[in-house]
Amino acid sequence: MQLFAIIVAGLLYAISIFGEDVTLTDENFSAQVASGTWMIKFFSPYCGYCKRLAPIWEQFSNEQGLSANNLHIGELDCTQYGSICDQNKVNGYPTINLFHNGQYIEEYTGEQNAQAMAEYAKSNAQKYI
């Protein structure tokens, strides 16, 4: 069982370093977010705003240069992992938060388009390199 957990953690890390979106859960949230700079989307699959953001978020997570800045992208479904959302003071959906080495930095409140999010992410990731 431990070997399986190690393999899964390794795969999730490998995916995250290439700027792809990591699905976070109550089991991997703390371990994943503990290292590096993360932009995390907290969402509900039933939320209309979240549904509209989904393709933009996907485009953002595929932006070139994010992994070069040691930036990781993640998302967490608050309907499944509400305790993590509560711990991170998520009061509405979608909420996009910036974390560095496990610490909450700030909520992203900019435009909801891939270019604006990428510019924000890159500029903030460079602060923590």
Image (cartoon, grey):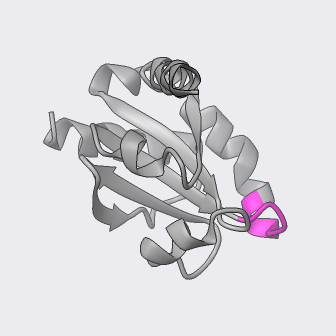
Relative to 100, say whether 105 is above or below.
below
Image quadrant in which the C terminus is located: top left
User: Magenta stretch containing residue 46, yes or no?
Assistant: yes
Q: Is residue 59 left or right of residue 91?
A: right
Residue plotted at (29% across, 27% down)? 69
At which x and y percent is residue 107?
39, 66
Q: Relative to the observer, which residue lies in front, 51 or 11?
A: 11
Question: Is 13 on the left-hand or right-hand side of 4?
Answer: left
What's the residue at 42%, 60% (across, down)? 97
Q: Is residue 49 magenta?
A: yes
Q: Residue furthest bottom?
A: 91
Residue range (magenta):
44-50
Q: Position of residue 117 (x, y in %)?
A: 47, 47
Determine whether, in the image, residue 15 is placed left or right of residue 106: right
Locate the N terminus by quadrant.
top right
Foreground residue among 58 and 46 = 46
**Residue 5 vs residue 92, the one in the foreground:** 5
Residue 47 x %, y %: 79, 69
Task: Give x and y (percent) for residue 16.
Answer: 47, 26
- Residue in front for this viewpoint, 105 or 114: 105
Q: Is residue 113 above or below residue 5?
A: below
How many numbered marks does the figure carry? 0
- Residue 42, quarter of picture: bottom right
| Picture residue at 30% right of the left edge, 45% below the top | 34
Up the image or down, 27 lies above or below 22; here it is below
